[in-house]
Image (spheres, rainbow, N blue to C red):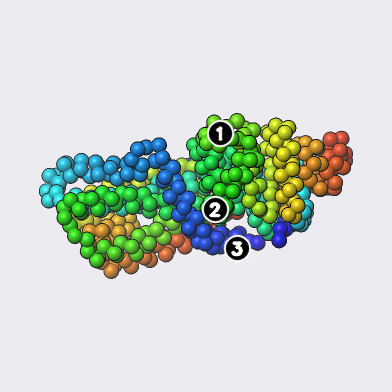
Amino acid sequence: MGTAAIAFRDLGGSLLRLPLAARLAADDIHGKYRRTVLGPLWISLGQAAMIAGFILVFSGLFNIEPQTYALYLAAGFPVWGFLSLYLADMPNTFIVNKGLLESYELPWLTLIWRRSIGYFLLFLHHIITLVALMAILRVTPTIEMLYAIPALLITIIAGTGVGMLLATIGARYRDVQPAMQMAAGFLFMFTPVMWRADQLQVNTWAYEYNPLYYYVTLVREPLLGRVPAPEIWMGAGAGAAALFVVGFLAFLIGRRQLYHWL
Amino acid sequence: MAHIELSDVEVSYPVYSTGRQRSILTFAAHRASFGRVAREVGQIPTVDALNGISFELKEGDRLAVMGRNGSGKSTLLKVCSGLILPDRGKVSLQGTRASILSLGSSLDPDKSGVENVEMIGQLLGVSRKERKLLLEDVADFTELADFLHLPVRTYSSGMTVRLLFALATSVERDILVVDEVIGAGDALFVEKAAKRVRAMFDRAKILVLATHSGDIAAQLCNQALWIHGGRPIMSGAPAEVWNAYIDQRPPLEAVA
């Protein structure tokens, strides 16, 4: 059997085992917070504390109404956290799971889906802050918020593509993970999470050519009750399809050498 | 239907000796300077691990792989597990498989034995109801008793092997691939493991076992392969191949 056939069978097997990947992801989060009293709620609390701090400082600095800014941040930070995990956490996926791959017959890509779904579950914990804030500020949820569901699906597909690419390269080159962590911190400055795109009058290329801008907007807009513009849907959707194909091709090409790299 | 077939398999793998060979930044610098910077990045040595290996295993076949350290036994087991794809030659693997290739590496050291059994049970697609039986079976076989509720990192290597072996053999798999780690168990355990593997083979499966012990090979296997320098030297009945291996007949110089 050729490498391509093995890679396609792996992809097919991993799609069939998506429920397994989801169970393992839930198990990972549960395990991580097992020894704490509040459990995964720690994530939401940390998030709330950070947003409170930002509002104290930046609402004055940017001269925005604190309530609007709070909602903007509470929606934007979880989305940013979700996206940046794909960059900063995916590269070591195959490396740390070597033992599991050695012991059990398991599609390699199940490990990528497991992380992907794990990031999504973390995102759901982070979004609790937004829900609480909406309750406090008496913002009524609107039907437009449901657009967040397809937006998240598109983002997960794009991220999983990035994950396949980075996990493959990350197995061969061990400095990919620290490099991507640095890149994520750098890109945070260029992505409208703390600031709004329309506030930037000069150097607008900083977000216009930044793919993360499109995904942040795609998911954040519905959370704030707005429908993202059609070009955002198109750009993010086409990007997701392209990233998934590129990521899978990287895995397909790398698969022959992948075990030797671990 | 379990089946393994290797025909004329050749495997070589890269050996990264310096950190710079594993750095994407160094690689970029190397490329950007047309190879003038970081010369060693362009010259990564490879090891020829396997060469001209062919065999076929059908249901009920239990193969012992013998050879000195570095002869290619582990690489061969990884080919049989579907982890390594051959550079040349053909490998066909049919059937579900479980492998014990390294100590404890598939266990989460921070989780207790019970939690690890739970996770691996999920991984193997065991239903919730059957996972209870799985845990009972593992507890019964490993005799770890209360240790099963402690984190795996507190286990001795022998205890870890028992847990790994119990898990790998708890759910019916068609192909079982075992590296010599089994030697880490105490004598009583080896006997118990042998019993369990034999029980597994009553249901007609394939075993591939790398070993440094003639006794284990004779107890568990019904055929043997001796490899040296990645090449096949001799195959046959375990006792026969083992004796030849110990006496070094045929002399290796003659073959190599």
- Can residue B73 be seen here? The reply is no
Q: Which residue position holds label 3?
A: A5
Q: Are marks 3 and 1 in contact (CB under 8 Å)?
A: no
| The label number, if any, that marks residue B146 in the structure image | 1
Crowding near the residue tagged with mark 3, few <14, some 14–19, many ≥20 C-alpha atoms within 10 Å? few
| The label number, if any, that marks residue A231 in the structure image | none
Identify the element where label 3 is drawn: helix
Query: Foreground residue, B92 or A166?
Result: B92
- Do discs 3 and 2 share a chain? no
Q: Residue at x 37, y 37 (%)?
A: A36
- Can residue A10 be seen here? The reply is yes
Q: State whether residue B35 is above or below residue A254.
A: above
Instruction: Give the mark nearer the N terminus: 2 vs 1.
Output: 2
> Label 3 amino acid?
Ala
Q: Quadrant of the N terminus of chain A?
A: bottom right
Mark nearest the camera among 3 and 1 is 1
Q: Which residue position holds label 2?
A: B129
Mark nearest the camera among 3 and 2 is 2
Query: x, y percentage for residue B197?
Result: 72, 46
**Count of labels in the image:** 3
Q: Chain of mark 2?
A: B
Quadrant housing residue B203: bottom right
Real-space Cα distance between discs 2 and 1? Answer: 22 Å
Query: x, y percentage for residue A209?
Result: 31, 58
Q: Chain of mark 3?
A: A
